[in-house]
Image (tube, rainbow, N blue to C red):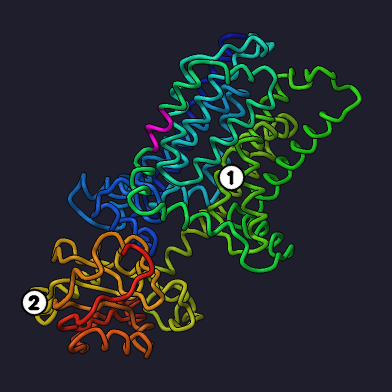
Amino acid sequence: MQVAQKRMAKKTNKLAVNLLVSGLVFRSFIAFWLYPSFDEAYYYVYSLHPDWSYFDHPLLVAFSTGFGPWLTGNVSQFTIRLGALILHTGSLVLLYLTSSRLFSVKAATLTLAIATVTPIYQLAFGTFTLPDNPLIFFWSASLYCAVCEFFKEDFDFPPSAYVPSYRLAILSVLVGLACLSKYHGFILGFGLVGFCLTSKQHRNVFRSPWTWLGVGLFLLTISPILYWNMQHGWVSFLFQSERAVPKVGYNFLNVLLVCLVGIGYLFPTIGFPLWRITLKTTINQISQVFSKNTDTDGKEFKDSKNLKNIFILWLSLPLILGFNLIGGYRQILPAWSMPGFWVATLLLGQQTVIWYNRSKRSVWRWLVGTGVVVSTILLFLLLHITTGTLQKPSNFALFGGFVAPQNDPSSTELIDIQQVRRGFAESEILQEALKKSNFIFTNRYYYGGLIAMALHPISNIPITCFDIGYDIRGFAFWSKPDEWLGKDALYITTEAFTTREDLMTSYKSHFNSFNEIAKVPIKRGGIVVNNIYVYQAKTLLKPYPRAYGL
């Protein structure tokens, strides 16, 4: 019996390692070939301006994005994503360990398999460099630490024997680091407090000196956010809180649409079961509270399985339900609620064990089939974005292509920074213009990141943003409004903005002269699909207006 168990454990461990390695290889392939997205390039600029915090996000995304360029000295889409690749592998390991401790090794392996094949986890958490990379890592670390603190092995139950320990101090630091990654981390802290309040066995945590030490360590950990915001009128908190304030009427159909979009990003074969098991578990726990068999002394949570489910729900539902409900009055990005689904994957992994015991073949068909379909779709999209397999015309088009570049802005707007870099390096006009200019500006904050990446190591001229709509994000704090008065600049933008008369009129009124000097063609499949336009702007006459950072 023991020999069989050892063989099974060895087989399971090998499968877990294979999942981790194959997932890392696949994500690395995408990270190497896919052009940087707007947000990723913008976060690269964070790494050029080290600070205690930033206008729209805390500081850890600067470290995770800058890690690769600092380590290698090279700036590319792959190097800025190196931190994301490493952090997500760690997040998967922590999720596996959490499931193993809560449920079983089999549940942990199936949970790992589900998390590995889910597309939005692969991309938003594990490939693109985003604040979500360190957030999910420290969220997962907090989850594992909390499980080790609040749940002993099953044979050590009842859980009423819980005694607070030093892990509370460690947990507080981990939650603080999640907050330093993204403001979602505060919701993680809310969930942990909510669990302890609703679990009679764990309420004594609030009387423990370890908890109050943890509160102090938490405040110390998030002090960079507090310090930076104290210096800048709490602008980050105002910016983020405004997103939660309704500005239009409520539309319940939009809530349904947000749910369906989220299921699409999770992929339907994962999204629907994940929603089902989450709602089913929630309803079961609520029904037990009002059940006639419930002990009036509040001992309904004594059962370890229920307590574990409640713990998972407290760390998942606030995000899942909260952001989906906010979707009724404002646009929601799919990644905003995904940390909640990440935790809820533990429930799906445990449910999959039940399905696995009924039909091993069906479970593997489901998981392998999902993995194959998702991988095929992602690779096909990657080929189209980089080579134009669906583009008409294109040297690599399938069946002659289907869509013209001008009708495919979602893919042609992504910029190959290597082509831009070569265009500047090979143009004598642009080289001379760079030498004579004091700074570079663009009309959108995200273009500033792409320009910064493309010009490394050709030039280290400061880059800023002059946006007629005043949405310049972090650039408002990386320069002073009058810093460039009397100085010469280069204005760099894409073809889509060259026909904006309001932009051109605004820039011409702020400079003594403003003229186009060159353009860099961006090709895909041998066909020009976009152009980078460069204008020479001489002598800034007056500060460009901005809404904040004055």
Secondary structure beneath dot 2 equals: helix
Image location (x, y in percent) of residue 369: 61, 49
Q: Nearer the viewer, residue 222 or 84?
A: 222
Instruction: Give the side of residue 122 with respect to residue 373, left or right.
Output: left
Is 370 part of what is drawn in magenta?
no
Q: Nearer the viewer, residue 17 or 4?
A: 17
> Three-letter amino acid code at disc 2?
Lys
Image location (x, y in percent) of residue 332: 58, 60
Image location (x, y in percent) of residue 191: 60, 35
Residue assigned mark 1 = 368
Q: Which residues are magenta?
A: 217-222
Task: Say which quarter of the image contains residue 491.
Answer: bottom left
Residue at figure coordinates x 41%, y 52% from the top left: 234
Residue assigned mark 2 = 436
Relative to residue 73, is residue 542 depicted above or below? below
* Dot 2 alpha-carbon crowd within 10 angstroms: few under 14, some 14 to 19, many 20 or more: few
Residue at figure coordinates x 64%, y 29% from the top left: 195
Residue 323 seen from this side: yes
Relative to residue 536, is residue 481 depicted above or below? above
